[in-house]
Amino acid sequence: QTPVSERAGCLERLACLMEDNMPQLLAMLCLEAGKTWGDGVAEVREAIDFCRYYATMAEKMMAKPMRLHGYTGELNELSLHARGIVLCISPWNFPLAIFTGQVVAALVTGNCVIAKPAEQTPLIAYFAVELMLKAGIPAGALQLLPGASETIGATLVADQRIKAVIFTGSTQTAALINKTLATRGGEIIPLIAETGGQNTMIVDSSALLEQVVVDVVTSAFGSAGQRCSALRVLYVQEEIYPRLIERSEERR
């Protein structure tokens, strides 16, 4: 088990490597995931932020036990430890940022990782793993396993050697994963799932309607609406509704 400072150093180096390789990452995001150039830039930056954030938080939370308040004078300490093998299942809509965030969070906390990227975007995941290995992450601690979720993902979730699952995707799939983990028996297996949302925007008369139209279109239709943060419901103050519709039609 390597010290947390050493693991955090790998993430810091990975962040720098992603900055150095941004043109290649952008090209792959555009080619394989169909990203616009602007969305690609935002995604690479998010992946870099994940690396630096988790590096900082791991050192803060795992460097030494946290002292807890004791009401009767006893000594209470909380220490965080790795669980073992973590399965990371990432989506196609953020094939670099979410893939990286899942993997580095599990690695920096001392776990080994099996990374299962979306079957639509395996090349981006492969390039990201190559950068991770170059940053110093041991090859034995990280395995990339691309393929169909129905076969590979389901098989791994049911495997007793998997000690935690990090998943981003549909609510229905998350429910199936949760059911499988619950029926395995034995210890409780943590599931960290990021799924869909019913996201709402409320627009009142103080809003700049031109900006509202831009934000609505960007949020609702970015990645063809396939984002957990995508706008689903728009509430508009009645007095400004006709003008908002007019601005929207002008934009078309």
Image (cartoon, grey):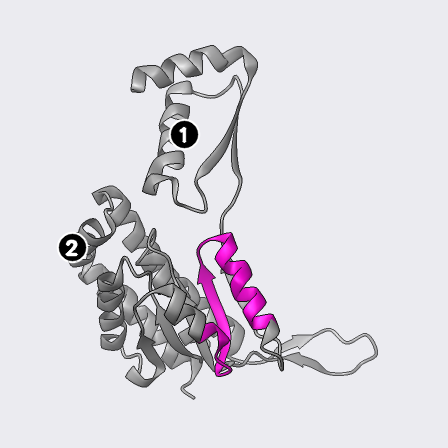
Q: Which mark is residue 23?
A: 2
Picture mark count: 2
Who comes first in sequence, dot 1 or dot 2?
Answer: 2
Please state, as top left, top right, bottom left or bottom right, where the C terminus lies in the image. Answer: top left
Q: Who is closer to the viewer here, 200 or 212?
A: 200
Query: How far across and down, in percent of the image, does residue 72 sit?
Result: 83, 78
Looking at the image, which residue is at 58% across and 66% down? Answer: 179
Amino acid under disc 2 = Pro
As drawn, is 103 to the left or to the right of 240? left
Residue 54, compared with residue 233, is above or below; it is below
Looking at the image, which residue is at 46% across and 11% down? Answer: 242
Looking at the image, which residue is at 22% across and 66% down? Answer: 127
Looking at the image, which residue is at 51% across and 74% down? Answer: 164
Q: From mark 1 to mark 2, how far is it between C-alphas?
A: 29 Å
Q: Who is closer to the viewer here, 10 or 29?
A: 29
**Residue 165 colored in magenta in the image:** yes
Residue 67, compared with residue 193, is above or below; it is below
Q: Name the residue under label 1.
A: 216
Given the current orientation, which residue lies at the most extreme front position? 151
Q: What stretch is highlighted in magenta?
A: 156-182
Amino acid under disc 1 = Val
Location of residue 248 (image quadrant): top left
Q: Which mark is residue 71?
A: none
Element class at badge 2: helix
Location of residue 229 (image quadrant): top left
As drawn, is 226 to the left or to the right of 58? left
